[in-house]
Image: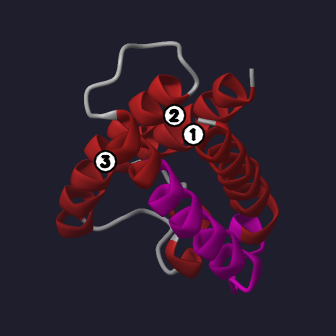
Amino acid sequence: MISMIGAGAFSLVIILSILIICGLPLGELTMGGQYKVFPAKLRIVLVIQLMLQLFFVLIILQMGGHMPLWFSHQVTKVIGVVMAVYLSCNTAMNLISKSKKEKYIMTPLSMVTAICFWITALQM
């Protein structure tokens, strides 16, 4: 169940990423709110990030037993722990962001996802 919550929270981030890539003025939700609309060159980076985000949703679903493992049990667990550490750091960075929108919207999403990754990876 925790893995489903984590996948759902991460999926919200993916949807926001897609909207930013498409040029919607949601840039204040990321990178300290530097851009209201992301420049085209940065959107390319977001596309790469989007692919990684999709991969990590699959990983948490695999750790939760909702999908067959692509990697060994141990490798999947290591990926999950690494992602939990990353999301924990991301939560801290969002919390100190200059952008109020990033602080109040992305911090809770990141925190929920980090907690879900920690719990799922450590229970695996």
- The region drawn magenta spans 80-102
Q: Which residue is mark 2?
A: 60
Q: Is residue 65 left or right of residue 58?
A: right
SS for tag 1?
A: helix
Rendering coords of residue 59 (x, y %): 42, 34
x, y percentage for residue 30?
A: 54, 67
Residue at which label 1 appears: 10
Dominant SS of magenta comes to helix
**What residue did someone put label 3 on?**
52
Residue at image coords 65%, 47%:
122
* First reached walking from the N terminus: tag 1 or tag 2: 1
Determine which of the numbered discs, if any, sits on residue 24 in the image.
Answer: none
Q: How many marks?
A: 3
Coloration of the structure image: secondary structure
The answer to whether residue 53 is visible is: no
Pick whichever of labels 3 and 2 is earlier in the sequence.
3
- Between marks 1 and 2 in the image, the one whose residue lies nearer the viewer: 2
Name the foreground residue: 43 vs 58: 58
Three-letter amino acid code of the residue under disc 1: Phe
